[in-house]
Amino acid sequence: MTNTPIQQATDPTAEPPSANTAIDQDLLHRLADAHGVGTSFYGWDGLQHNVSPSTLIQVLGSLGVVAHSNEQVEAALVDAEVAPWRRMLPPAVVVQEGTNAPVHVHVHDGSPARLTISLEDGTELAAIQQEDWAPPRDVDGVPTGRATFEVPAGLPLGWHSLTAESDGVTATAALAVVPAKLQTAAQLEERRGWGLATQLYSVRSKRSWGIGDFADLADLASLAGARGADYVLVNPLHAADPVPPVQASPYSPSTRRFFNPLYIRVEAIPELAYVKPRKRATVDRLLDHVHPLNKDAERLDRDQIFAAKLAALELLHTVKLSPARQRAFEEFCRESGPGLDDFALWCAIREDRSPDDPFWQDPAATLGSPKVESMRQALADRIGFHRWLQWICDEQLESAQAAARRSGMRLGVVHDLAVGADLSSADAWTLRSSFAPGVSVGAPPDMYNQLGQNWNQPPWHPVRLAEAGYAPLRAMLSTVLRHAGGIRVDHILGLFRLWWVPAGNSARDGAYVRYDHEALIGILALEAHRAGAVVIGEDLGVFEPWVRDYLAARGILGTSILWFEYDGDSPLPPERYRTQALASVNTHDLPPTAGYLAGDHVELRGQLGLLERSVAEERDEHEAGLDKMMGLLRERGLLPADAGGQELGEEQVIEALHRLLAQAPSVLLGVALVDAVGERRVQNQPGTTSDVYPNWQVPLADERGRAVLIDDLDANPRFNSLLAAVDEAVRG
């Protein structure tokens, strides 16, 4: 028996509220608070904003709570209070190492109960019952009592389970013992480190198929490691659509667990050596077709490149694996489990169906349904192909991490984890039961997006995720961290609360929904501990002040961006930066430093109609800020106090900014590869779509707009000079 409530409450249904229905706002706010829905929030303007009653009702509805009348709200409040008593066990228990944790077991009043702890290694322990004077209560007509047991403090880190038994009825729940503080960054406290940050797709070599790939990542890591770098931070490498056309944004993937075959280096697949001459000639022709794209410095053509790679990969998949490689493939599939099978099934179905096909919303077309299981049988060959693609991705990522570590890097490859997956994604279909329906994730209005943002990604349903034992989150993290030295968590504030936007609402008409951050951060720390990986949280934007302190206490590094670190109207002195942080001059949502210094972003936003003020006013404010920063650089002796009437060189200023940053105590320093080659174009212009600006499609180029290949970097004076300056400043 799984851990279901002793007696389920009837699932209420209700008609939409009539125009005459008036809901008591205090009651509605109490209900919202009971379910973790914020009734107000402080915006970027520092003012408190109230969430409208209609939005609260919609968000509660996505949580499965009907609140269209006072009677329904009152009934839902009672349900919220009694809900824990309907369960024999909590849906999941997450406890920090070295602490005791009470576990409540609900049984028929007067019945004895027993709780067993099963450890990962197979050891079983009997939990000790504690005194509990909570009076019994009537739960849906059943007299119910509560027995309290204690999870002892000495349990090892890991994923264990709880089993409760009473009157022949059993229930199980996941038990995660997580680090009180992740220690993987401790080595950086003894000796700080620095590394490169880049968008992998933009970084190509003479051997690329028109786009950066896993082999290019290995080469870039080797180059940087030889110059003292400790890591290479890349954009999210999550899988996109299985066939062209594909989503350009790496932050709107089809899944956050598996990887994008677009990054596969075809020639690195061992089976290529055994392809028959005619098929090998076909592979060569496909490469010849896209190879000239390596010289294109204007825009990447993912669709053409992916089509060519898929055709080549189809041919290689027909080659019979050697016995040793066949066993390795089977072991990979076994370790990946049903999640890989389900993702491969989605890919196979998605090849022939568009994202807006009614199939994806058909209640009869869910995982496990007869309709879908018959498709699983019919599409077995295609499913096998997509499983094989993920195995190749895994092998090549393993090779890239090995190359990074051989070069002397302490961390190696650091992955980026997107906030979520697209509404029409594999995750949205295969993990449907763990997501909240009818809402998407976004952000409230801020100074850059005064209408708010809707990212069109379904949020985790807090209760259903716990009911799944956090298995989807655990599987995603363990897969991403499998061959990594670190992970950057985009918008880590989303593990505390997320801005939910109901379908049909504008992005500003949303509400924050709270998550069990103790559990989510704990699980993140546990999986990072197991992988030996550092965790970096992107903690920029609007956040509650205590969040950064909490993350630091749990061993999670924060993020500091030079242009955002201010003390009033003046740049924050670098020695006042946070120690437990990754500090960098810029981020992918800002122009490269060369473009920022020139004010290119002001002109671009003006051209695109994204400014609330005139271009002249924006430029005046921007230049005033630059003057203050240049003053700080001169004050620190990083730029000459008197340039003798000569303008400072852009490269000189960029190096000075990085030397200034190195004066911060932050344990990690980031250097954007675009800054090391003189690129000026921004990778992503917030507030625009790809038909307005080529977001996530800009190849790496130098200050003259010429394509820069990895092969060029070893002898690139600007690249070598900046990296040498940073290494000297950090080690000095």
Image (spheres, grey):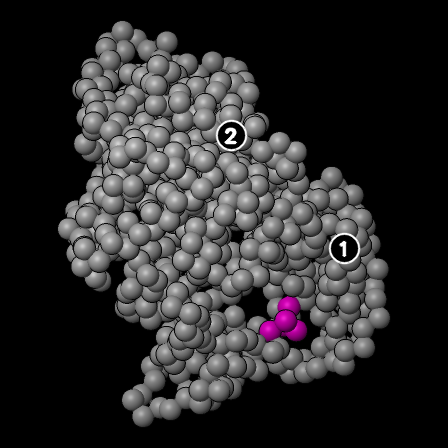
Residue under label 1, please give it. 99
Residue 217 makes an appearance in the image: no
Label 1 – label 2 distance at C-alpha: 42 Å
Q: Against 364, is 398 above or below?
A: above
- Asked whether, in this view, residue 96 is left or right of residue 480, the answer is right
Main secondary structure found in the magenta portion: helix
Label 1 CA crowd tier, 10 Å (few <14, some 14–19, many 20+): few
Q: Nearer the viewer, residue 382 or 64?
A: 64
Q: Against 208, is 360 above or below?
A: below
Q: Which corner quadrant holds the N terminus?
A: bottom right
Asked where in the image residue 218 lies, by quadrant, the reply is top left
Residue under label 2, please give it. 729
Q: Nearer the viewer, residue 143 or 225?
A: 225
- Dot 1 falls on a residue whose secondary structure is loop
Locate residue 177, reporting x and y percent: 69, 49
Tell me the kind of residue under disc 2.
Ala
Which residue is painted at 67% across and 64% down in the image?
89
Locate residue 347, reporting x and y percent: 34, 39
- Dot 2 falls on a residue whose secondary structure is helix
Q: Against 647, is 526 above or below?
A: below
Asked where in the image residue 296 lies, by quadrant, the reply is top left
